[in-house]
Image: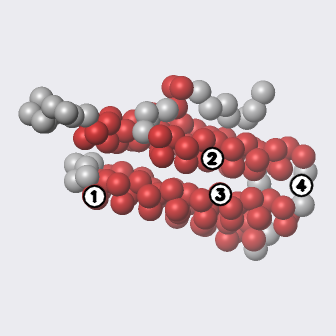
Amino acid sequence: MAFLDWSDSLSVHYRLIDADHKKLVELINGLHALGESGATHSAIESSVKQLTDFLKAHFMHEETLMRKTAYPKVIPHKIEHDRLMKQLEDFGERFNAEQVGLSQDTVMFLRTWLCDHILEVDTPLGQWLAKLEQPTDNAPKT
């Protein structure tokens, strides 16, 4: 069993966002596995960088979708993204400087943050996007 298993309960029912979230689950599982196996500092550093880079791209993608669709909760959603990126970048800097190691608390935090963020913040975004894709009653019939 993986550290974090993808399940339909984590789906926001928007294909592109779900694909990114599945990749994030994979990256967090990989980081956890490295920590459990006693991997080298270099391997963990590379994994943290990969996670950070992917999160940046994912957040940019979500934020672009929110702006393009005039999502009403774009500002608090972006604040959540910015807060996590700051925490992850701070951790990465301290880890790279060998001031901290990769702890179980760190990967637990990432798992909890991702699940909570998906369920509480991204699910309403998925519902918003799905609603926009639904034809209206006034749409011409083809």
Looking at the image, is 6 positioned above or below residue 79?
above
Query: Callout 2: 10 Å neighbours few (<14), some, many (20+)?
Result: some
Residue type beneath disc 2: Lys
Of badges 4 and 1, nearer the viewer stands 1
Is tag 2's residue or tag 3's residue first in the polypeptide sequence?
A: 2
Identify the residue shown where x is 68% and y is 61%: 50
Residue at the disc numbered 1: 68
* First of labels 2, 1 by sequence position: 2
Q: How far is disc 4 from disc 2 in space, using C-alphas? A: 21 Å
User: How far apart are the alpha carbons under marks 2 and 1?
Assistant: 24 Å
How far separated are the C-alphas under marks 4 and 3?
A: 16 Å
Residue 36 vs residue 69, the one in the foreground: 69
Is residue 100 visible in the rendered image? The answer is no
Disc 2 to disc 3, how far (Cα)?
A: 9 Å
Percent from the top left, x then y, of residue 73? 27, 48
Task: Give the secondary structure at mark 4.
Answer: loop
Q: Amino acid at mark 4?
A: Ala
Q: Amino acid at mark 1?
A: Lys
